[in-house]
Image: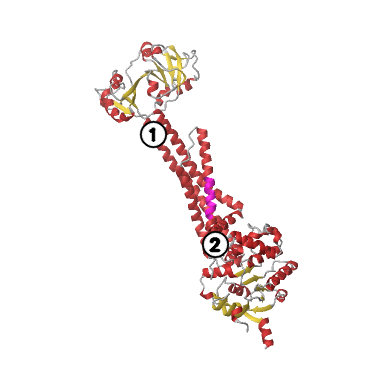
Amino acid sequence: MRRSRLRPGDSLRVGFVGLRSRKVRTVLSALGVAIGVATVVSVLGISRSSQDELLDQLDALGTNLLQVQAGQGLGLGGNTDLPDTAASQVRNIAPVEEVASVTSLDGPALRSSYADPNATGGISVKAAEPTLLDTVAGSVAEGRFLDDAVDDYPVAVLGAVTAERLGITAVDGQTSVWMNGRAWQVIGILEELPLASDLDRAVLVGYDAAATYLDADLAPSRLYIRTASSSVEQVADVLPAQANPEEPENVDVSRPSDALAAKAAAEDAFTSLFLGLGAVALLVGAVGTANVMVMSVLERRGEIGLRRALGATRRHVRGQFLAESLLLSLCGGIAGVLIGAAVTFGYAQAKGLHFVVPASAVGYGMLAAVGIGVLAGVYPATRAARLAPTEALRAA
Amino acid sequence: MSDAVSAVLELQQVTKKYGDLEVLHGVDLAVDSGELVAVLGPSGSGKSTLLHIMGTLDRATTGTVIVDGHDTAALSEAQVAGLRAHRIGFVFQAFHLLDGLSAVDNVANGLLYSGTPRAERRARAHAMLARVGLGDRAGQLPRLMSGGERQRVAIARALLNRPAIVFADEPTGNLDSHNGAEVLDLLRELNAEGTTIVVITHEHEVAAAMGRQVEVRDGMIVRDSRRTAEAVAR
């Protein structure tokens, strides 16, 4: 007695023919799976691309920048400055590579003498040391930064936001801002400073110029400190005592790069949210596929009966519908990965990010597709296999 | 009596019940190798049920069904499927060709569940299509063919596994008289070449074209031309 037997290659081909014979339906239901998979892949891809960008930025800016300012605490009232000696004391800490002090001055900085002195636009005036730019890993968009040569002249460097608010886009030697009753020539405009974004809204002047023309108290209100990368923690520990030996508890030490790191971490939270959306899309795709397969079984009872008459066992029929469902969702999965990668690429291009599609995203996408194929296929395939041949032939 | 060894199909006291309703009441029928038999009966006579039981698509409630020497009651579902894959061919009124496949691939499906490699299936399918007069239509899709051509494709498929017996269920039911006559001619030719064929029909003209007529009514065989002939001979 010879048994009935379907070769493995034939069983794949049978599934493929089933899909090929119903092209529109196949494409539409594969599209359902593709959308779900594309969502997952693009969410993971975009979040990884943005994270990569942030981490790159973090790498470029360095995590070895510390910032010291007078604390608000302990009821000491209005003294929000550090001692005059703070900068030189901090320079004495061995691993410290660079220090730049900044002193907040009384504004306002105006576009011209005719401007309303109360409309400061949130722009502050600060005295800054020439070392500041290197210390905060900043760069100049236009012109130059403060240096020793101009330190005692009434010249100013504008933060990126300041320049925008004042409507100054070029450094041409003619442009000036109005402070304390005189014009200050603008010699430079900065790029945005991700590690010191309050400086973006400042007008920076030299310490000597501030002393000469603004007659201000020049005790530093903040220090920016670059240390050796290996001893950031240790330096942070000794900074309060060094900066203000008399009131070390009145010194706040922070690490500006922590904010960027937190932003990178926050991407993860968004990712989970959008992944949830992707999961919903996948579920919809699965339901669609299951629906198509159930309909297919109902419609193709004649074919099922024929195949049983040709010698197919129940197992062969079940295998055929499972194969169709799997092939369908695999095609959807592959299309979804490609669409997801394309979306990520487009987003990365538009935002100027690196284009990264993590292998895990492709893996999860394909895994989800196969899962859908099996889940959506099992019930219809079992129903098809259970159909008695006589019933199947009669219905057709 | 005919020699039991040469019987391809043997039904002994076969009954079929659906719940309390008995639709076959003790049918005895033997078909010898090389016969061309018409099972004739009006709709509701039980001839379709009889076809399903003879073709192993359904099982008898009681009685014995022996196909190609195998007592089907003793066979498992999978073994019965094997019997259909290797030893039985079917031709249906509605053709049951797959729309997505060309004529030759439809014919090749006759050996799909026998484990025969695809190349060999297709080679034999080409030869069989040529035998039924459609050698030049091998690549054609069934929906672009006439009813008569489609039924010939279906017949080629039924013959591909060199079956011990072919069951044709109202093979001319969907055809006009010209195409119907051609299909009947083809069945007679194939029978002349040695194929055992059982045609199920409700048309007397169709039955008259066969070598032997078995008439079914109300779940029983009321006339069998071979028995009548044997009785006369005796």
Q: Which residue is mark 1?
A: A261
Q: Residue furthest bottom?
A: B234
Residues beneath discs 2 and 1 located on the same chain: yes
In the depicted view, which residue is nearer to us: A68 or A386? A386
Select label 2 or label 1 by which is in front: 2
Q: What's the residue type where badge 1 is placed? A: Ala
In the foreground, A192 or A302: A302
Instruction: Find residue B6 and report its horizontal and vertical position in percent.
Output: 61, 78
Disc with the residue nearer the chain's start (2 vs 1): 2
Chain letter of the residue beneath label 2 in the structure image:
A
Q: Is residue A276 visible?
A: yes
Q: Locate residue B231, reporting x and y percent.
A: 67, 87
Q: Position of residue B101 (x, y in %)?
A: 63, 58
In which quadrant of the rendered view does residue A137 lie? top left
Name the one closer to the observer, A184 or A152. A152
Image point (69%, 87%), residue name: B233
Q: Within the magenta stretch, is there residue A331?
A: yes
Label 2: how many Cα within 10 Å (few below 14, some 14–19, many 20+): many
Q: Which residues are magenta?
A: A325-336
Q: How many marks?
A: 2
Per the picture, the main secondary structure of the magenta-coloured stretch is helix
Give the quarter of the figure containing the C terminus of chain A. bottom right
Residue bearing mark 2: A6
Q: Is residue B153 left or right of residue A28?
A: right
Q: Give the amino acid at mark 2.
A: Leu
Q: Residue B84, labelled with which disc? A: none
Can you say whether A394 is above or below A125 in the image? below
Q: Quadrant of residue B32?
A: bottom right
Label 2 secondary element = loop
The CA distance from mark 2 to mark 1 is 58 Å
Q: Secondary structure at mark 1?
A: helix
